[in-house]
Amino acid sequence: MTAVRGHRAAIDAFLAASTGGALHHAWLLAGPLGVGKASFAEAAALRLLADAMTPGTLPPGLAVPEDHPAARLAAAGSHPDLRVLRRLPKKDKEDELARSITVDQIRSLGPFLGTMPSLSPRRVIVIDAADDLERPGASNALLKSLEEPPAGTVFLLVSHAPGRLLPTIRSRCRLLRFDPLGDEDMAAVLARALPDADADERAALVRIGEGAPGRAIGYAGLDLGAIDQAVEAIARDGDPRLERRAALARALSPKAAQPRYEAFLDRVPTVIARLTALRFGADLRIALDAYDEARAVTGAARSLSLDAQGTVYELAGIVARLAASR
């Protein structure tokens, strides 16, 4: 089972409810992408099932021993009282995920909810992420289950953008907030997840991850420190001879560089946002406009599959305005 690092307030609130006889039937785990909400949902689901299976035998906290029967079943993906719904692989492209959790996936919970739990009085359903629910069908189908859940059923809904969920879904859930991790917790998570990475890379990933270890792990091996340095150099010194943007475009446009190009699309608005915080007056307005334009370009690049070389060149040009404005 994935260990949960940080998020002490959320863990304490959940454990207090689960041990105090006031466990709500639905929980909305809300916070930025990649901070550990899904890991918490996995750990919380297992704890609930293990506690119900062997009441009063577990030590305090969220952890469950690996040799516990519930832990073994969950690790094998065969616990009869646990369901985890995520986007499924596409039928024609198994290396890509479907755009949404479908209404059929939600309806498949019917037989699960229509029978008694197998190993204890409790069953748990994890939706990772509720933001991915197909609208309106899957959202409405889930709402029906949330309105009249069978006894002993607990829903754990992971959400990166809870404001986009149906208000009626939000109103039926107890909210648990998850904030970005501090540097110490980030370093500990990355040390466990990336044991082969050297200290310099992990330190760079702590900075780039900005409190979200899931994001940082996705950046591992891409040398994003060098990308950030290149973008920051353009923002600081400009690019009057167009050499820096051309070099970036050449480096990031080949097909083999696709992962670094995708990361570049993430990093440019983030770097601009960080630099924006240091500006005032007219310079601040220019930086804010650059941020908005960079977000628009990166969004279009992904949705329209724009040419990578031209996109890198355009984004670097937007960054260069920050130097010109100073």
Image (cartoon, rainbow, N blue to C red):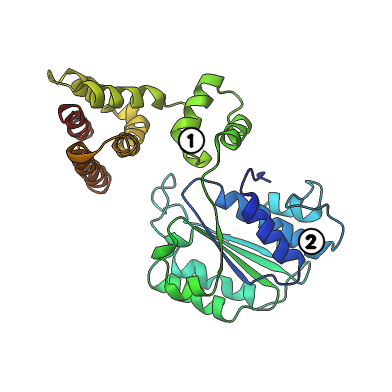
Residue 199's mark?
none
Of the residues under marks 2 and 1, which one precedes in the sequence?
2
**Crowding near the residue tagged with mark 1, few <14, some 14–19, many ≥20 C-alpha atoms within 10 Å:** many
Q: Which mark is residue 216?
A: 1
Q: How many marks?
A: 2
User: How far apart are labels 2 and 1 at the CA level?
Assistant: 33 Å
Horizontal relation, residue 142 to residue 82: left or right: left
Whether pointer 2 and pointer 1 mark residues with C-beta atoms closer than 8 Å, the reply is: no
Question: Which residue lies most toward the bottom here?
Answer: 148
In this view, 185 is above or below 245: below
The three-letter amino acid code for the residue at tag 1 is Ala
Spot occupied by residue 107 in the image (x, y as percentages of width and height): 51, 73
- Secondary structure beneath dot 2 equals helix
Quarter occupied by residue 293: top left
Percent x, y for residue 151?
Answer: 69, 78
Examine the rendering and report whether any part of residue 267 can be seen: yes
Q: Which residue is mark 2?
A: 51
Tell me the element at label 1: helix
Q: Residue furthest left?
A: 241
Q: Quadrant of the C terminus?
A: top left
- Establish if 87 lies above or below 146: above
Q: Specify whether residue 198 is in view.
A: no
Question: For the residue carrying disc 2, how many other residues have a C-alpha within 10 Å: few (<14), some (14-19), or many (20+)?
Answer: some
Q: Position of residue 15 (x, y in %)?
A: 71, 59
Q: Which residue is depicted at the point 80% across and 54% down?
A: 69
Residue 122 x/y as whole percent: 73, 69
Q: Nearer the viewer, residue 164 or 1?
A: 164
Query: For the residue marked with disc 2, what is the amino acid?
Result: Asp
Name above or below for residue 319 compared with residue 171. above
| Residue occupying the point 26% across, 44% down | 295
- Residue 52 relative to residue 195: left or right: right
> 76 or 171, which is in the foreground?
171
